[in-house]
Image: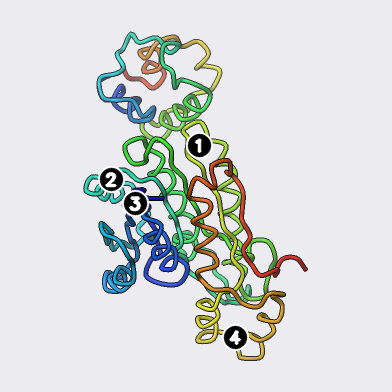
Amino acid sequence: MKEFIQNLENMLDLPAGELQADTRLTDINSWDSMAIVGFLALADRKYGKAVSPAAIKNTKTISDLAALVGQS
Amino acid sequence: MTGRRVLITGASSGIGQATAILLAELGCQVVLVARSEERLRVTRALMTGNGHVIRAFDLANLEAIECWLKEVVASTGSLDGLVHSAGIHRTLPIRFEKPAMDDPLWRVNYFAAVALVAAFRKPTIRAAESNIVLMSSVMSMVGQPGVSAYCGSKGAIQSFSRAAALELAREKVRINCVAPGFVHAMVSFENQNALNDEQLKAIENYHPLGLGNAQDVANAIAFLLAATGRWITGTTLVVDGGYTAH
């Protein structure tokens, strides 16, 4: 989970420690459609998971995202 | 542009060198990039002002660009601008072209631009407001026999810059292209390589205003980089003596 969060912080240009497992996606300023596309690319390249955009709709927190790529 | 810091690739010759010299006159600190450190020293000796640094680097080394740029900025401080003037020209009929992912022309002309932009846009690399100028060419808009790969790469740069402009506007990063016609520096290159005097004269005659100088293009780059380009992004400034007006 720690590494997943670090990868997400890098992707969103956020300082280390900004995100926690229970951070709500709606509380992240830069969590927009571009960020979602970026997350799908991250899921594929770093974790080898093909996550569908539809699956993102049901996510509310960082740990929900982590679960999509088998990280918890 | 006093106090602004701009990184220029291809700074060892031609348009890149002319741009470095002009930006120095305008008060910039310039990070000079090319493969040859020796030739960059020659450029620096022609520049006024202080604080210009040399960073020799081969942009064909795409995978290393992000790390390299981080290291550069760690010692120079963040960048206000980026000019990608490094490029490879090739005259080769299509029948001899062998498309390959490791083609140096595509690596330097196009993929390096993408890698530079992707690295430059990071908040730790660029200033709060920054901008990028990529080198396209009139050869992106009109064709010429024997330069299909070069034309392709310069067209790709323009299309890329439009998408990048929309994507990066929210990050206060402007990005534009310049599309030069034939400048004297380019003509001497062609003279040595592929075209005879008659062919070169025909090219010159096709420019209503004659051939340009590297300085003419540097002027356009400076215009886009400075506050004069404040409201300009996602466009290509054609600087060609009228070549593409035909």
Q: Position of residue A57 (x, y in %)?
A: 53, 13
Return the chain for callout 1.
B
Residue B67 is situated, as x and y percent measured from the top left of the image, at: 28, 47
Residue tagged 1: B168
Q: Is residue A48 above or below residue B45?
A: above
Q: Amino acid at mark 4?
A: Leu
Kind of element beneath mark 3:
helix
Of the numbered discs 3 and 4, the one sitting upstream in the chain is 3
Label 2 and label 3: CA atoms lie apart by: 9 Å
Where residue B65 is drawn, which disc sits there? 3
Which label was assigned to residue B5?
none
> Are the two marked residues, 2 and 3, in contact with CB atoms closer than 8 angstroms?
no
Snapshot quadrant of residue B36: bottom left
Q: Position of residue B140 (x, y in %)?
A: 63, 61
Residue with the mark numbered 2: B70
Give the residue drawn at x 40%, y 10%. Answer: A61
* Marks 2 and 4 close (CB-CB < 8 Å): no
Find the distance from the CA under tag 2 to the CA under tag 4.
41 Å
Q: Residue at x 41, y 40 (%)?
A: B121
